[in-house]
Amino acid sequence: MTTPRFSPTDVTVVFFLGGPGSGKGTQSANLVSSYGFVHLSAGDLLRAEQERTGSQYGDMIREYIREGKIVPMEVTVALLSNAMADSLASSPPPAGTKARFLIDGFPRKLDQAHFFEDTVCPSELVLFLDCPEDVMEARLLKRGETSGRADDNAESIRKRFRTFVETSMPVVEYFRKKDRVVEVRADIPIEEVFAKVQAGIEARNIHRR
Ligand code: UDP
Ligand code: MG
């Protein structure tokens, strides 16, 4: 048995899942301002690593992201774990309170979930945004007009949807069986989604931990 790097007595980890374009980034910003979460997007961390001078993973990450595939978990988990450590060192939570991390777009595969919970920190809750593919596709194509993201095009989007259904939904099912999922429909106005997200967070007392 390995001991996780961080203890749930010191930090609260919430995983944030949902298909590409379901609105995780938007709702993450709301959660940061309302509850003081530290927002860590696995995709953003991977894109930053891809651009980092001297990274040995840049080309590999670029290829995986364009193909909508899951980057080998050791890379992603190390980026997340180090980002948590950096945050705790540079802006520690007030004495007597726990740091809250919102891990956006992760774990996208069951082995990542187990590896993270065994080596980094067990999670408290999974927030899941449920959105129809046609709505997500329209949002992503719109975002692609300005995002500059290499995967916001019709072909990459199709691959990302497939990965989500085949590989990431089993993560949601796994946590659902453990009754650790708050599921919210995401094809309604942003404020209404957030109201439901808030209700889920507060029903589970995440905001008081
Ligand atoms: N990705 C990955 N592992 C992760 C998270 C993301 O390999 O744990 C890669 C994957 O190729 C994914 C891409 O990064 O399609 C973009 O992820 P992001 O979360 O930014 O996309 P979103 O779902 O927010 O549109
Ligand atoms: Mg995102």
Image (cartoon, rainbow, N blue to C red):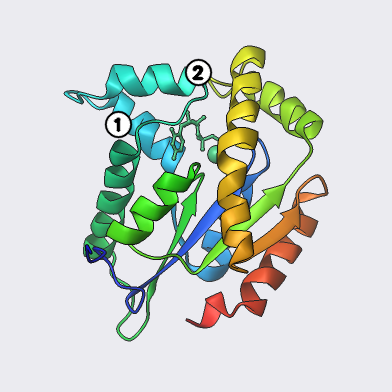
Q: Nearer the viewer, residue 13 or 164?
A: 164
Mark 2: amino acid? Glu
Asked if 94 appears above or below 141 in the picture, the reply is below
Crowd around label 1: few <14 · some 14–19 · many ≥20 (10 Å): many
The image shows residue 119 at horizontal and vertical percentages of 28, 58
Q: Residues within 10 Å of mark 2 (few under 14, many from 20)?
A: some
Give left or right: position of 153 versus 133: left
| Label 1 sits on residue | 49
- Location of the N terminus by quadrant is bottom left
Asked whether, in this view, residue 8 is left or right of residue 141, the answer is left
* Residue 101 seen in this snapshot: yes
User: What residue occupies the far right of the structure in this picture?
Assistant: 188
Q: Nearer the viewer, mark 2 or mark 1?
A: 2
Where residue 67 is drawn, which disc sits there? 2
At a point 37% along the width and 81% down the height, the residue shown is 97
Q: Residue at x 76, y 26 (%)?
A: 138
In the image, is the residue at mark 2 within 8 Å of ligand 1 by its beta carbon?
A: yes
Q: Nearer the viewer, residue 8 or 104?
A: 8
Image position of 204 (left or right of 62): right
Q: Is residue 171 left or right of residue 23?
A: left
x and y percentages locating residue 111 in the rendered image: 41, 46
